[in-house]
Image (spheres, helix red, strand yellow):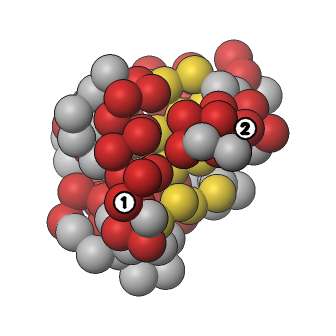
Amino acid sequence: MSAIDQIRDTVTKNDVVLYMKGTKMMPQCGFSSRVAGVLNYLGVDFVDVNVLADADIRQGIKDFSEWPTIPQLYVKGEFVGGCDIITEMTLSGELDQLFDAKGVTFNKEAADKIREANG
């Protein structure tokens, strides 16, 4: 199975997938840490894919999404964005709306606390 096929399979079979440097419990870069931290804080059940563990996946995810940077968040098979986009969506409430629309369970009170702390 090619890296692209493997990526397509992963994002199709899982509701929320984060391609990141490191893992959700041990991120290996600040941007990955921020996005994983938001998802963990919101209580989102997500699959983490460590791109540092596989060079083909690391390049493949960039080709698959046509997005040059990592981390990359996918929700229900749809590419959402990287660190800056996820941060903006969290603060604006758009991430809440996306999760609601896609049927992804998350802690709304935690989302409100993030906005209060950054308001």
Q: Quadrant of residue 63?
A: top left
Q: Which residue type carries mark 1? A: Ala
Residue at x 36% of width, y 60% of height: 55
Outermost front residue: 1
Q: Is residue 116 above or below residue 93?
A: below
Mark 1 nearby-residue class (10 Å; few <14, some 14–19, many ≥20) = few
Residue at x 55% of width, y 35% of height: 4
Q: Quadrant of residue 104?
A: top right
Residue at x 65% of width, y 26% of height: 77
Q: Viewed as shown, does residue 67 lie left or right of 4?
A: left
Q: Is residue 64 above or below residue 105?
A: above
Residue 72 numbered mark, or none: none
In depth, the one of 102 and 7 nearer the eye is 7
Q: First in sequence, mark 1 or 2: give its number.
A: 2
**Mark 1 → mark 2, Cα distance in angstroms:** 18 Å
Q: Position of residue 56 (x, y in %)?
A: 42, 52
Q: Position of residue 72 (x, y in %)?
A: 39, 41
The N terminus is located in which quarter? top right
Q: Viewed as shown, does residue 95 lie left or right of 106?
A: left
- Which residue corresponds to mark 1? 55
Q: Nearer the viewer, mark 1 or mark 2?
A: 1
Residue 16 in view, yes or no: no
Q: Secondary structure at mark 1?
A: helix
Q: Which residue type carries mark 2? A: Asp
Mark 2 nearby-residue class (10 Å; few <14, some 14–19, many ≥20) = few
Q: Is residue 19 above or below residue 77?
A: below
Residue 97 in view, yes or no: yes
Q: Is residue 17 above or below residue 75?
A: below
Q: Secondary structure at mark 2?
A: helix
- Which residue corresponds to mark 2? 9
Q: Position of residue 86 (x, y in %)?
A: 34, 36
Residue at x 56% of width, y 61% of height: 48
